[in-house]
Amino acid sequence: MALSLKTIPNLIRQTSSRLKVACLISGGVDSCVAALLLKRLAFDVIGVHLNVWNDFDFKEGVCHETDRNDARFVCDKLGIEFKEVDFVQHYWNHVFIDFLKAYESGETPNPDMFCNRKIKFGVFLDYAVKNLNMDAIASGHYAGTSLGPFWEYRQQHITRNEHVELIRPKDKMRDQTFFLSQIEPSSLKKVLFPLQTLMKEEVRKIAIENGFERIAKRKPTTGKILNLSTFIKLHLLGICFIGKRNFQNFINEYIEPKPGKMIDIDTREIIREHNGLHQWTLGQRCTHHSKPVKYFIAHKCLKSNNIYVAAGEDHPSLYSNEFTAKNMHWLTEEPIELRQNELKCLFKFQQKEDLSECTVTKLDNNTLQFKTKKLQRCLTPGQIAVLYKGEKCLGGAKIISYKNEYVAKFL
């Protein structure tokens, strides 16, 4: 059954009719339904497709053209204006350069977080408000704010002068607040997340029932990264521009190879050579044709340029329950518990992982110490430890080091 305005509360309809919203349209089902809901709720909505990477840079597996065509199809079918906005130079200067610098320093960054902060909910939000005369932007992220998916609680916030909070969505399996943890708190006042109270299957159903079966059933075009472990794929969500190229080949186009040795952390035997710390991350599987043993990256030494590997995916050198992080980015005010003593909360540093209990204390104004209740596999410098309290996402800090007595003992 198609959506009916009869099911929409008068409060939302009356509010939405005055608001102009630029909805990010990727070409996928989530942004499609986000725009559909806004249109049905009488928002004055336009669709915007962002371009952050030059098409000519692709050699194979181009995903942009398919996405662009599907985004235009969605807007045409909804009867809303379609715009394509180019932020290639902004992405290069404010996301990709930092991405490369992090890899050169031995870290494993998450560029999608900073694309959200600097591009989608940064320069694009400013562009939409100032150049397109929009009141807000919207996206198909599975996330929410305390304003509600359609700003139904906006007036309460204005009256009470409350902070806008980033809230976990109904669909916890697809919760994307992790990737939104680094955006500016002020941006939350100008963002709608129409999928906040929907499950993925509900989204697909809405799309199909409203004539978007092609979009609902299309295969993802976010470039498949060949010959890379699942661990890396989870860390590097948001780099569609790679296409179907091997990640190591891609990164070598921008970072000079720097050969070193892979050494067994227990036996000190040289297992193989490598072409740079930037090609590997903690926990990634590495093999050699002459070795039947499955090795995993346990430690990267920037000083010696050597990588220490451990035999077996459950090796003790891969696990830790204590780490430090810096540059905490708060979406809300710093919790009073942390200022007075310690903060007990939940956290995760990988999108697909479950939330884990931790205790956070301040070492100084810029550095936090985390102690986790359960051992964590491969706490990775460069990744963001994202904090949660109940349904609220508090923000996140960059992991800079971890404590592992096994690694310290053998190095």
Image (tube, rainbow, N blue to C red):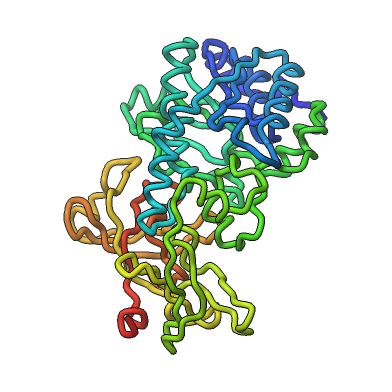
Quadrant of the snapshot with the C terminus: bottom left
- Residue 316 visible, this angle: yes
User: Residue 1's spot in the image, x, y percent?
Assistant: 82, 30
Number of disc labels: 0
Q: In this view, does 315 lie above or below 225?
A: below
Residue visible at 45% across and 18% down in the picture = 127
- 145 with respect to 4 (left or right): left
- 94 with respect to 231 (left or right): left
Furthest-bottom residue in this view: 267
Q: Quadrant of residue 318?
A: bottom left
Looking at the picture, tell me which residue is in the foreground, 309 or 148: 309
Q: In which quarter of the image is residue 268?
A: bottom left
Residue visible at 34% across and 84% down in the picture = 410
User: Residue 308's spot in the image, x, y percent?
Assistant: 43, 76
Looking at the picture, tell me which residue is in the foreground, 30 or 312: 312
- Residue 384 visible, this angle: no
- 236 with respect to 165 (left or right): right
Q: In this view, does 283 lie above or below 227?
A: below
- 235 with respect to 369 (left or right): right
User: Residue 57's spot in the image, x, y percent?
Assistant: 59, 35
Residue visible at 45% across and 68% down in the picture = 378
Residue visible at 71% across and 37% down in the picture = 203
Q: In this view, does 352 lie above or below 83?
A: below
Q: Quadrant of residue 201?
A: top right
User: Residue 108's spot in the image, x, y percent?
Assistant: 44, 56
